[in-house]
Image: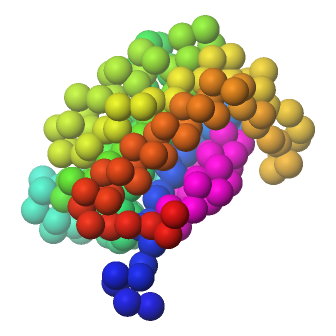
Amino acid sequence: MTEADRRPLLQIIVASTRPGRVGEPIARWFAEYAREHDAFEVEIVDLADVDLPMFAEPEHPRLGRYTLDSTKAFSATVARADAFAIVHPEYNHSYNAALKNALDHLNQEWAGKPVALLGYGGVAAGARATEALLPVLLALRMVPVPATVPIPFAAQKVSGEGEARTFTPAPETEAGAKAALDGIAGWLSTLGLRGHR
């Protein structure tokens, strides 16, 4: 397969690392929805599996001179992505520490790539966390797409147990997901990375 034939890689980042987190079944649902969109290759990157330490590199990430094996591995993972969707919770009116730590670990690997935000929570649907996250993404020179996917009362839409848990989106959530994926595909097209829609 030539570079011209390659479909762009969309990485879906599961931001929460808590046991039983709602973000995991939401990410699995969104991954399937993105595959049906048919413009991307899709990969889930679960920060619980990545298991980064608190940022402890001696040099600024923009230099790319990493010393820790965990940073080198995470750098290689993120570098191969063309776009991201971040599935994130809202904790105390903001996003969670594991996500900030992951973002802070790298620099050039994030830059210039489109990103969609799927925030979840209670009545606020993760909206305050999404707003808090936007300036961080802009500082990393990422390109947030205008369509966000707020998911209110997310836990009520998850059923089943363990790995079999499933998320059932409301029609508004599905419409938001389509708009977000269309936004990512549009930006990738601008960059000359087209899927096979």
> How far across and down, in percent of the image, does residue 153 sit?
68, 17
In the picture as drawn, the residue positioned furthest to the front comes out as: 197
Task: Identify the image quadrant of residue 43.
Answer: bottom right
Vertical comparison of 126 with 15: above or below: above
Depth order, front residue of 26/193? 193
Is-magenta flag for residue 35? yes
Specify how the rendered protein is coloured: rainbow
Residue drawn at (63%, 24%), measured in percent from left and top? 172
Task: Identify the image quadrant of residue 121.
Answer: top right
Per the rendered image, the range of residues in magenta is 24-49
Residue drawn at (19%, 59%), measured in percent from left and top? 108
> How far across and down, in percent of the image, does residue 158 sit?
79, 31
In the picture as drawn, the residue positioned furthest to the right comes out as: 160
Is-magenta flag for residue 149? no
Residue drawn at (64%, 34%), measured in percent from left and top? 174
Depth order, front residue of 35/67? 35
Depth order, front residue of 156/191? 191
* 6 lies left or right of 156: left
Magenta stretch secondary structure, dominant: helix
> How far across and down, in percent of the image, does residue 52 sit?
43, 53
Q: How many marks?
A: 0
In the picture as drawn, the residue positioned furthest to the top comes out as: 123
Task: Evaluate whether residue 69 shows in this view.
Answer: no
